[in-house]
Amino acid sequence: DIRLTQSPSFLSASVGDRVTITCRASQGISSHLAWYQQKPGKPPKLLISSASTLQSGVPSRFSGSGSGTEFTLTISSLQPEDFATYYCQHLHSYPLTFGGGTKVEIK
Amino acid sequence: EVHLVESGGGLVEPGGSLRLSCAASGFTFSGHTMNWVRQAQGKGLEWVSSIGGSGIHTFYADSVKGRFTMSRDNAENSVYLQMNSLRAEDTALYYCTRDIAYSSFDNWGQGTLVTVSS
């Protein structure tokens, strides 16, 4: 089974900061990776598909990169509405798995 | 617009059964793999199961294999999750999602809560 290790698990940052979250896969998964944002009491929202494709309606301050085993989600300038928990997920083969999540909180 | 609406959650005793449903609309249902993902209170996301568009192929997490069965009715635009031999650790919010192969789960329902407790 493919394991995803997300880091950090917790991040404290200020409005305007550049934030980078890393997701490492235990084996190569090509670009079969997605990033989600989840706010309390809400279902996850898709931000990035296929490692780097920004979903329609998602602000351009979000970007994804990587392939193979190492991936990053970057928020270029953190906004108040970006404080949330972020998850990566691989869709390379079954069983599908999610990373453990990164909670982004206000410093 | 894609809509996914889950139902069927509730309180059940350990060892009991429950059947979740997910009604889909706004897209060509038979053209998409569908999934169930769960989230225990305060915890992360866990993929539970997937079913291909034709309903022939199903996949399960090890944690539910042999106890849960996913099915679909393309005429009714619905997917189901039959959950048997329920355990306390199955307590979670269960989300129905639409799959874009190798790419993402691009649409999620609001979830239905399953509580396993005596």
Image: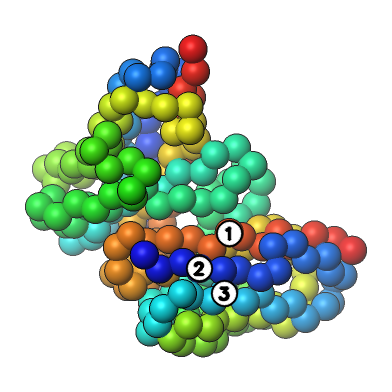
Q: Quadrant for residue A60, please give it.
A: bottom right
Residue type at numbered disc 2: Leu
CB contact under 8 Å: marks 1 and 3: no
Label 3: chain letter = A
Q: Mark 1 points at which residue?
A: A100
Question: CA gap, disc 1 to disc 3?
Answer: 9 Å
Residue A88 x, y percent position in the rendering: 52, 67
Q: Where is residue B47 in the image (x, y as percent from the top left)?
A: 40, 52
Mark 3 near mark 2, Cβ–Cβ under 8 Å?
yes
Q: Residue furthest top?
A: B118
Left or right of residue B82: residue B115: right
Amino acid on which the number 3 mark rests in the picture: Cys
Horizontally, residue A36 falls left or right of residue A95, namely: right
The coloring applied to the image is: rainbow
At a point 19% along the width and 51% down the height, the residue shown is B58
Q: In this view, does A78 lie above or below B11?
A: below
Mark 2 secondary-structure assignment? strand
Same-chain status of marks 3 and 2: yes
The tag on residue A23 is 3
Q: Toward the viewer: B47 or B79?
A: B47
Q: Which of marks 2 and 3 precedes in the sequence?
A: 2
**x, y percentage for residue B96?**
37, 46
Residue behind mark 2: A4
- The verdict on a common chain for dots 1 and 3 is yes
Q: Mark 2 lies on which chain?
A: A
- Point out residue B29 in the picture as x, y percentages from the top left corner: 21, 54
Q: Is mark 3 on a helix, strand or loop?
A: strand
- Closer to the chain start, of discs 1 and 3, is 3
